[in-house]
Each structure stands twice: as C-alpha cells, then as structure tokens.
Image (cartoon, rainbow, N blue to C red):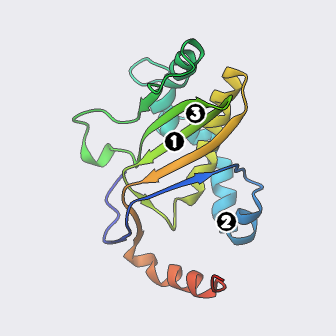
Amino acid sequence: MEDGGPIIEGPPVLFEIASLGWNDPVLLRYGDRARIAHWSRASRECAEDAGGFGGRLRDRHGVDQLRWAAGLLRARPWTTSAWVSLTDPGEPADSVPCLVALAFRLRGYRLVMTAMFRSQNVYRAYLSYVPLREVQLEVADRLGLPAGPMRVFVDVPHVAVEDAERVASILAAQPEAA
C-alpha cells in the first residue's frame, strides 16, 4: 500500500490458476521457504483481519461483500455484476491496496474468480494468491459449488530495484525453455 522506492515495471499481465494451496508442488520446490512459512501463518489473519484485505471484503462500510456476492450469484447465476471493490474514492494514496477488486462468476457450474491488482511486486507478493484462492473457495462453499479457475490481472507488475540482483540470479538458474 505504500511507496517502496524505485521499481522496474513489466507490462500488464493476465493469467489463470487452475488450483493452488500451501502444498502446491511449484511453491514447495521453488518458493522461498521462510516466506511460505510466514504467509501460511499470516494468510488467515490477513483474510480475516480488519487491517488486511479481509476487513475490506467482510466489513466494508458495514457490508460483508463476500456474502453479498454469494447472495447475488444465488439469486441470478448468470450475473456479471458480482464485483466487490476494495477501494474507496478519495482515500489517502498510501492506503490504496494493491488488490483493488474481485469479480465472481458462475461458469460451467463452477465459481470463477478474477482478482485485479493495480500493482504487484512479483518477487515479494506471489504468495498472496494462496489466501485469494482461499477466499474463492469460501464463496464457492457458500454456494455449494466447486471452485473453477482463479484469474489474476496485474496492471503494473514490478520488481523493486533493491531486489533486481536476487531476481536475476533466480532467473539465471532456471532451465532454458524448449
């Protein structure tokens, strides 16, 4: 939420995750173990805490937005209006979260969720997708449906300049694409 100093920006990106959890083999093989341990302990707290995105989802001006989205989808399964915002017009710039909105849709009898980030540090914040997947699973459970894919859009993916050498060493260690 705050300005962390100079960054190296990439182009906007949209991708889809079919499934994800703390036991994901890619995370276990390539993820930073200390960060995984920290995020896995903190994710529930962040998802429920008023100071984390949970407060913006579960009690935004007195509205539980996840309950609202599930109710709308239950009443109108075809709707494309089950969007929830995590921002407020005019809030201080240093309070605007990186995750700005979630969209929920029912497609093929599964709950599809799209997460929109205004900005994301791709080196430090990749583990935020696991608690977001947990939010999707929670809404799917409320509807009695399985979760489908989670789509993620990041408008400004970036790496902090101070992390550039560490990122370069990780990329250099990866095998060449076939």
- Measured as percent of width and height from the top left, residue 49 is found at 54, 35
Name the residue type under label 2: Ala
Query: Dot 1, crowdedness within 10 Å: few (<14), some or many (≥20)?
Result: many
Look at label 1 and name its amino acid.
Thr
Image side of residue 94 versus residue 105, left or right:
left
Image quadrant in which you'd find residue 136: top right
Provide the residue designation for mark 2: 34
Q: Residue at x 65, y 69 (%)?
A: 32
Disc 2 is placed on an element classified as helix
Q: Earlier in the sequence, mark 2 or mark 3?
A: 2
- Between 73 and 33, the one lying in front of the other is 73
Identify the residue position indicated by label 3 in the image. 48
Q: Residue at x 56, y 52 (%)?
A: 128
**Label 1 sits on residue:** 114
Looking at the figure, which quarter contains the C terminus?
A: bottom right
- Residue 115: image x %, image y %? 49, 44
Tag shown at residue 148: none
Q: Nearer the viewer, residue 53 or 65?
A: 65
